[in-house]
Each structure stands twice: as C-alpha cells, then as structure tokens.
Image (tube, rainbow, N blue to C red):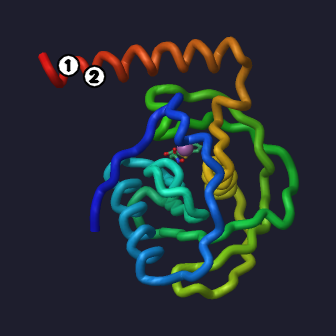
Amino acid sequence: MAKLAILEFPDPRLRKRALPVSAVDLEVRRLIDDLFETMYAAPGIGLAATQVDVHRRVLVADVSSDGSDPHALINPVILQKDGVAVSEEGCLSVPGYYEEVERAKHIRVRYQDRSGAEIEKDFEGLLAICVQHEIDHLDGKLFVDYLSEAKRSRIRKRLLRDQRQSSTAAIL
Ligand code: GNR
Ligand code: NI
C-alpha cells in the first residue's frame, strides 16, 4: 500500500474529467487500497482518484469514526436524487476552508464494487453528501465552484500564497 500526494486547488489537474474503468483488475484494486490509505491518513471521509492525479472513475468513502464502513465505488452513476440538504463541506484539495453547499438529500447510485459486481444502492445523510462531492471530483468539479466568484477567488489567492510559502520553506 502507498500513501499518495493530494493535489490542491487551483491545480489544473483537478479539472480533468476522469475516464471510465474498463476492467476491475489488480491495478484498480491497488488504486482503491492506496486511496483508502491516503484518505484515512489525511484524515478525510472520502477521496476521488482525480485528487491523487489518477484520472479514472474510482472513489472511496468512509464516514464512520472508526474506519468501519469503507465504500469503494467504480464507474458511479447517480440514477436518482431526492430532497435538498445544505451542509458545511470541506475538501482535502481545498485545505482549511469550509462552506455551505446544497446537495440532494438521498441518491440512488449504480456502480461496480472492488470485485467488479454491478451494485445499485441508496445513500443518505453524510455519506450521500460525500458521494456527490466525490463524483463531482471525477467530473473536474470542486465544492468551491458552488460559491460566489468573490469567495472562490479569495480562496484561490490564499491557497496559492500558502503553496508558494511551503515550497519556498523547503529550500530555506
Ligand atoms: O474529508 C472530507 N470531508 C467532507 C465534509 C463534508 C463534505 C464532503 C467532504 S469530502 C472531504 C474529503 C475530500 O476532499 N474528498 O474529496
Ligand atoms: Ni474533495
């Protein structure tokens, strides 16, 4: 297993649209293991392959407090959305910022699991929010895209400044 580096906004690689996984093989299962290791270490409740610069439609999530409810979704498609839920979101690719975002409250998703089996499952609560946030990543979309241009550009400027500072600190 390996912990992978997480891309940070406004890195243009976060804007790439991930391609479907054609076969759930050993390489995909290894990617899933690495995504879980990276997500738990961060720590976060979800992680999309896009965030580690792998542009394939794979995401992981676990909203439990003890790592007891891992979900790996390959080629996820939202079949149905119901209700509205507003919650405070954060993102490992936008570190330090938390803002309210409106999502569907319940979703029905079709995907393949790590054995390649076709699954249809209903998600609700924080897990539904998280899966929508991760599928957005696979489409090159970030939660800051739901904010005003003013807020988004303030976040972009501050993160760029932080990123320059930490890359300069490494040579001082
Ligand atoms: O760790 C995370 N927490 C979170 C909180 C509210 C809504 C979505 C998330 S996902 C985020 C991890 C992440 O950036 N996944 O892409
Ligand atoms: Ni995120």
Quadrant of the drawing holding the C terminus: top left
| Residue for point 63% across, 87% down | 117
Q: Is residue 7 above or below residue 96?
A: below
Q: Is mark 2 within 8 Å of ligand 1?
A: no
Q: Residue at (52%, 39%) from the top-left corner? A: 91
Mark number for residue 166? 2
Amino acid type, mark 1: Ala
Image position, residue 13 (x, y; %): 53, 41
Q: Secondary structure at mark 2?
A: helix
- Quarter where residue 99 is shown: top right
Question: Which quadrant of the structure image shows residue 120?
Answer: bottom right
Tell me if label 2 and label 1 are in contact, CB under 8 Å.
yes
Q: Which residue is mark 1?
A: 169
| Nearer-the-camera pick, 139 or 130 | 139
Quarter of the rendered structure image containing ligand 2 = top right
Instruction: Reply above or below: 52 against 74.
Output: above
Q: CA distance from mark 2 to mark 1?
A: 5 Å
Q: Residue at x 15, y 21 (%)?
A: 171
The three-letter amino acid code for the residue at tag 2 is Ser
Circle 1: element type:
helix
